[in-house]
Image: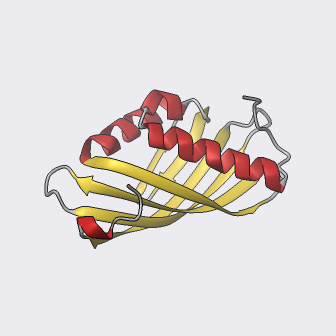
């Protein structure tokens, strides 16, 4: 696959969003982390951290507690080197067994090589019953 780099068009922005969705659904922390700049800065809800190692650790911990994780991302808007998405994902809490649907927004900024240098994420979790799942 050809590397997707700025400046983005609608077609390349959609492709970048789909590539991110596919990578996250792999639940492979090291693979996902490679899409980010070595010194990528993240805000994930109330957490702030920097760098690929921290990203891979965060994702590894996330997918240990969020079982049956399934994500869908939607392009919201884009500019030359920025993309905003809205997303939904469903998961089952490893401790309680409770199903959740998470709704949120992400704002991404990319460097010239197409690696994400800033990720800013906000989200809310909603308890759902197993039969209410949208993503199976």
Residue 5 visible in the snapshot: yes
Percent position of residue 67, x then y: 27, 47
Find residue 57 and report its horizontal and vertical position in percent.
Answer: 38, 34
* The quadrant where residue 45 appears: bottom left
- Residue 84 pos. (x, y %): 66, 60
Identify which residue is drawn at 53% across, 48% down. Answer: 42
Compared with residue 8, is residue 121 higher up or lower down, i.e. above or below?
below
Q: Is residue 112 left or right of residue 126?
A: right
Is residue 10 found left or right of 46 in the rendered image? right
Residue in the picture at 35% in, 36% down: 60
Q: Residue at x 38, y 40 (%)?
A: 58
**Residue 97 figure quarter:** bottom left
Q: How many marks?
A: 0
Dividing the picture into quadrants, the one containing residue 132 is: bottom left
Q: Relative to 52, does residue 104 appear above or below in the rendering?
A: below
Quarter of the image for the C terminus: give it: bottom left
- Depth check: give the residue in front, 76 or 112: 76
């Amino acid at each position: 696959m050809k590397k997707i780099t700025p400046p983005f068009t609608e077609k390349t922005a959609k492709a970048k969003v789909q590539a991110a969705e596919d990578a996250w659904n792999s639940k492979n922390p090291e693979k996902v982390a490679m899409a980010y700049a070595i010194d990528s800065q993240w805000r994930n809800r109330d957490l702030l951290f920097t760098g690929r190692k921290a990203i891979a650790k965060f994702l590894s911990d996330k997918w240990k507690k969020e079982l049956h994780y399934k994500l869908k991302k939607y392009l919201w808007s884009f500019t030359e080197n920025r993309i905003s998405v809205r997303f939904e994902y469903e998961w089952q809490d490893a401790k309680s067994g409770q199903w959740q649907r998470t709704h949120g927004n992400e704002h991404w900024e990319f460097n010239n090589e197409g690696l994400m240098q800033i990720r800013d994420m906000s989200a809310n979790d909603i308890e759902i019953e197993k039969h209410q799942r949208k993503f199976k």
